[in-house]
Image (cartoon, rainbow, N blue to C red):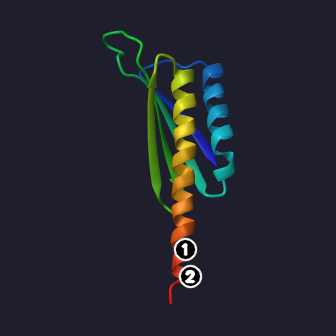
Amino acid sequence: MQVAIKSHGVEISDRARSMVERKFRFALTRFSPQLRRVAVKLTDANRPCGGNDKVCSVTLKFKDGRDARAVARADRFATAAAAVAERAARVASRMIERDRTARHRSRSAP
């Protein structure tokens, strides 16, 4: 599973980038056989006018071609990243479970 982290309009330190990557790897490691890529984007929603609105969004790219997205806002990137990593894990779990259920139904259908 490849984890790519990009920032748009803000400078992110190497330490912060490493922390965000660890959060996503920890949350999504159990889904790594099904995930091809995890693309994380960090932005400051109030960049031009100041404010404390940090946004972390993630796109999960599955090996079967499906995509899923999750977004979180917080006053700090670490908080937003932790929240969206949890959401991404729930989304991945639901998608994989739906796939398993659909395969099970198709096998047991007459």
Q: Secondary structure at mark 1?
A: helix
Residue 103 tag number: 1
Give the residue furthest to the bottom: 110
Residue type marked 1: Arg
Residue 37 is situated, as x and y percent measured from the top left of the image, at 56, 48
Residue type marked 2: Arg
Residue 84 is situated, as x and y percent measured from the top left of the image, at 51, 34
State yes or no: discs 1 and 2 in contact (Cβ < 8 Å): yes
Q: Residue at x 51, y 85 (%)?
A: 109
Q: Is residue 82 above or below residue 101?
A: above
Left or right: residue 44 compared with residue 85: left
Give the residue furthest to the left: 49
Left or right: residue 107 compared with residue 45: right
The part of the image, by quadrant, that contains residue 89 is top right
Residue 35 is situated, as x and y percent measured from the top left of the image, at 59, 53
In this orientation, which residue lies closer to the viewer: 6 or 33?
Answer: 33
